[in-house]
Amino acid sequence: MQKRSLVIAATIVLALALGTMVMAADRHIGIWKLDVAKTEVTGAPGYAVLPKSCIVKIEDQEKGIRLIYDVVDVEGKTTTREFFAKYNEMDYPVKGDPDVTTVSLRRINASTLGILWKKAGNDTENWRTVVSKDGNSWTITAKRKDLKGENFIITYVFDKQ
């Protein structure tokens, strides 16, 4: 009887732990605002133009996410881009972005995602996104190529709203 109680207790603890892991899997969910002062470009500094502002809204949907981002460029033009994707590394359509046609997501752990952007089947950007331990900041390391084919990196830093 005591052995059965231990098995039941262990099962409950495991279920609670798994439930906590599932909840932790949603660390990216929320509204994020770009901190332009903390965002930086490494390599090809003359090519990359950072936006004036960017707000990203990430919603939990159907074992994936819906991501909407509003970007205000240096000239003041606002563009809204969005997608829905699951964490299965399959390509999903992106709306509103002339430089990208599809996106795929890969969950690395509860705080980290891999995001691959493509245009017409060709990779355009490779992102690694990490939410801080306190959940208040989100860093995206975006690897890209400039017009000459040279690699450069943009490190975007967002604050949770």
Image: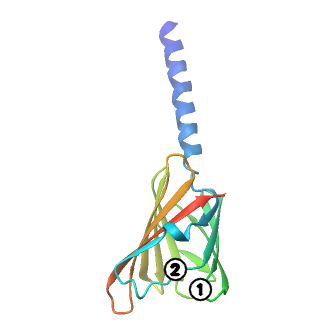
**Residue 74 — which label?**
1
Disc 1, SS: loop
Position above or below: 120 against 83: below
Residue 91 seen in the figure = no
**Residue 148 — which label?**
none
The kind of residue on which mark 2 rests is Leu
The kind of residue on which mark 1 rests is Val
Give the residue displayed 53% in from the left and 33% down from the top.
17
Residue 145, how many percent across, how many down?
A: 37, 84
Residue 12 seen in the figure = yes
Camera-side residue: 76 or 90?
Answer: 76
Mark 2: few/some/many CA within 10 Å (<14, 14-19, 20+): some
- Labelled pair 2, 1 in contact (Cβ < 8 Å): yes
Q: Residue furthest bottom?
A: 148
Disc 2, SS: loop
Residue 20, how many percent across, how many down?
A: 56, 38
The residue indicated by pointer 2 is: 50
Mark 2 or mark 1: whose residue is earlier in sequence: 2
